[in-house]
Image (cartoon, rainbow, N blue to C red):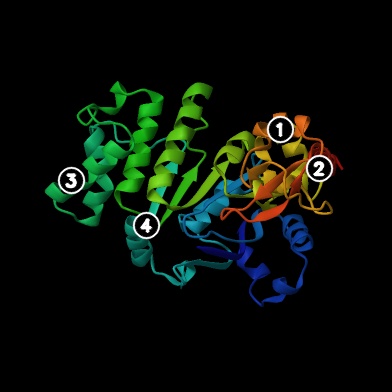
């Protein structure tokens, strides 16, 4: 999925700001300010990113930053004011309403914070409901629903009604329902934020387990940086409708673009986020005799080694090739870079 220069503006006549193409020559911040000064509300301003196959792409920011609006633009639940959105190289902004309904039913899975379950249906009927909208016969619907019930750990709850389930179980039903259509892209808008902390962590673990099996292309919305760190392959941090920085979690921690990004990352336990490859001393000669560690070993598990080996350890890649040396000093240097 590709999101290219997407704007969403609310007001009496938002289209006229983009009608002649002159907006493309303006700085997005300046244009956004100009639009706001004319009595319009800018929800998204020149948002661009790609979501790779099998990737968990997390969009985060404070309330009002535009993160939920952009995911609704991606799914075409709302129409962007300007820009382009591609799914499998097809521009969703050129699709008719009928075509969009078909795309949502067959290619998109969506999970929202408020679950949106149907109280008069039991678990398996809730999960099978989008398959009914697709026109599948009952036998095939139930068969597909049973597969995802097992996947999300709800076996034995098939005939329970929603009011008989805990909050975590209800969210599992929502996840199962979104997966039943076997989507190409999976949208989750703060799906766990209404849950208690312990249940929330369990659901994050469950989400990661399911993703390790399904390998979906995921767009995950959250305002919680700790949650983003746990699940993200890459993070896009938003402010005032614009993307401030995109990168892997370690990029935002070690190389924050500005104070807004730094504020989000300041309380992160860096030693649990950094990997051996993140603290390589590029100027240090590789030892032939030093102990070896994998490039993806968390620094938290390396600290005892680094404290006992002043000359450091050798970092190797996934095929065993030596790629550099990591030392206690290079770890401290990496933290100092983040502080500055």
Query: According to the image, label 1 marks what residue?
Result: 305
* Distance in Å between CA atoms under marks 1 and 3: 51 Å
Secondary structure beneath dot 2 equals helix
- The first of marks 1 and 4 along the sequence is 4
Q: Nearer the viewer, mark 2 or mark 1?
A: 1
Q: Which mark is residue 143?
A: 3
Q: Mark 2 to mark 4: distance in Å?
A: 48 Å
Kindly check if marks 1 and 3 are in contact, taking CB atoms under 8 A apart as contact. Answer: no
- Circle 4 residue: 104
Q: Are marks 4 and 3 in contact (CB under 8 Å)?
A: no
Name the residue located 77 percent from the left edge and 30 percent from the top edge: 307
Residue 232 location, x and y as percent? 57, 45
Give 291 or 16, whichever is nearer the viewer: 291
- In this view of the protein, can residue 183 be seen by the observer? yes
Inter-mark Cα distance, 4 to 3:
21 Å
Query: Is there CB contact under 8 Å for labels 2 and 1?
Result: no
Vertical relation: 131 (above or below) 225: below
Q: Nearer the viewer, residue 271 or 134?
A: 271
């Amino acid at each position: 999925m590709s999101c290219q220069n997407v704007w969403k503006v609310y007001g009496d006549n938002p289209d006229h700001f983009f009608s002649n193409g002159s907006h493309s020559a303006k700085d997005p911040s300046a244009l956004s300010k100009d639009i706001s000064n004319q009595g319009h509300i800018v929800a998204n301003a020149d948002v661009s990113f790609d979501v790779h196959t099998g990737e968990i792409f997390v969009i985060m920011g404070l309330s009002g930053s535009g993160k939920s609006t952009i995911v609704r633009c991606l799914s075409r639940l709302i129409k962007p004011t300007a820009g382009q959105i591609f799914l499998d190289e097809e521009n969703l902004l050129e699709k008719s309403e009928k075509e969009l309904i078909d795309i949502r039913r067959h290619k998109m899975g969506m999970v929202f914070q408020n679950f949106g379950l149907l109280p008069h249906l039991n678990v398996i009927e809730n999960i099978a409901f989008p398959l009914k909208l697709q026109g599948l016969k009952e036998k095939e619907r139930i068969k597909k629903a049973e597969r995802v019930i097992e996947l999300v750990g709800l076996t034995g709850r098939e005939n329970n009604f929603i009011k008989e389930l805990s909050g975590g179980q209800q969210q599992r039903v929502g996840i199962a329902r979104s997966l039943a259509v076997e989507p190409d892209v999976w949208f989750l808008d703060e799906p766990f934020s209404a849950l208690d902390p312990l249940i929330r962590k369990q659901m994050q673990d469950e989400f990661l387990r399911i993703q390790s099996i399904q390998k979906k292309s995921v767009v995950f919305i959250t305002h919680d940086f700790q949650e983003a760190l746990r699940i993200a392959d890459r993070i896009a941090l938003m402010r005032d409708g614009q993307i401030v920085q995109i990168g892997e979690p370690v990029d935002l921690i070690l190389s924050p673009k500005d104070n807004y990004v730094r504020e989000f990352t300041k309380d992160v336990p860096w030693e649990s986020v950094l990997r051996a490859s993140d603290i390589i001393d590029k100027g240090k000669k590789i030892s032939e005799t030093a102990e070896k560690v994998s490039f993806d070993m968390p620094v938290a598990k390396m600290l005892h080694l680094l404290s006992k080996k002043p000359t450091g350890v050798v970092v190797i890649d996934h095929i065993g090739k030596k790629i550099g040396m990591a030392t206690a000093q290079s770890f401290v240097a990496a933290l100092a870079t983040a502080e500055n």
